[in-house]
Amino acid sequence: MDIHATAIPDVLIFEPRIFGDERGYFFESFRKDFFRERVGEVDFVQENQSKSGYGVLRGLHFQKPPFTQSKLVRVIEGAVLDVALDIREGSPWFGQHVAVKLDSERHNMLWVPQGFAHGFLVLSDDAIISYKCDNYYAPEYDTGIRWNDPGLGIDWSFAEEKVQVSAKDAAQPFFRDAFHFSYDEFKQERIYSRGVARSAGES
């Protein structure tokens, strides 16, 4: 498994080493010991899977405390543009985001920590997305941020009139009006108690 740093150090890209031949392929999609060494203590308790068509955008979503979630996102089929937005007030990256193409050829994964909003846009005809969570879905704590808030500067690289969003996501608040986490409370070393520090560009 290789790790790639992003512009926000708390957000990581995991890319498995794939072993394939004429029969097919094999790769490790998750190893707890490897993950613990590079992120910290994370107890995944729920795994979700969704299927969406071309141009469907889901997000930007997160859950408020005490049901805040971390997510490890991967694409089983197809390709998506996956976005993690830092919404920790006081963070050096507050209001900044990471956008990564995830696809079923590379089987790469995006680590979205607590304190971030998450969303994705489907780039292929269809896409099946799976993600592990370290907290349970709690609809009464579920909220989000408007995906096309111009103040965020997210380049979805897609014609806005062709994007398909739910009525709920279309009515999410703008970033300035949304719930924000406290950076002091959601510093990664505080949440995950890392035992091993990461170096920039580790792979």
Image (spheres, rainbow, N blue to C red):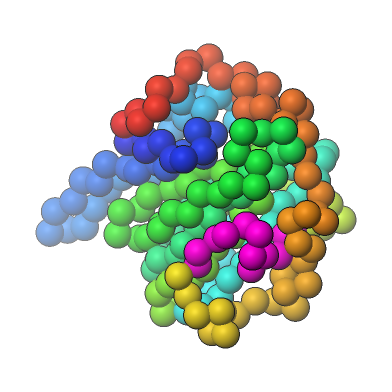
Could you tell me which residue is drawn at 12 percent across and 59 percent down?
Answer: 22
For residue 57, above or below residue 196: below
Q: Position of residue 65 (x, y in %)?
A: 82, 40
Which is the main secondary structure of the residues drawn in magenta?
loop
Q: Is residue 160 visible?
A: yes
Magenta segment: 144-156
Task: Specify whether residue 34 is painted magenta.
Answer: no
Could you tell me which residue is drawn at 67 percent across and 65 percent down?
Answer: 149
Q: Position of residue 60 (x, y in %)?
A: 66, 60
For residue 164, above or below residue 175: below
Could you tell me which residue is drawn at 48 percent across and 18 percent down?
Answer: 197
For residue 170, above or below residue 18: below
For residue 72, above or below residue 21: above
Q: Is residue 47 visible?
A: no
Could you tell me which residue is drawn at 50 percent across and 33 percent down?
Answer: 9
Q: Quadrant of residue 44?
A: top right
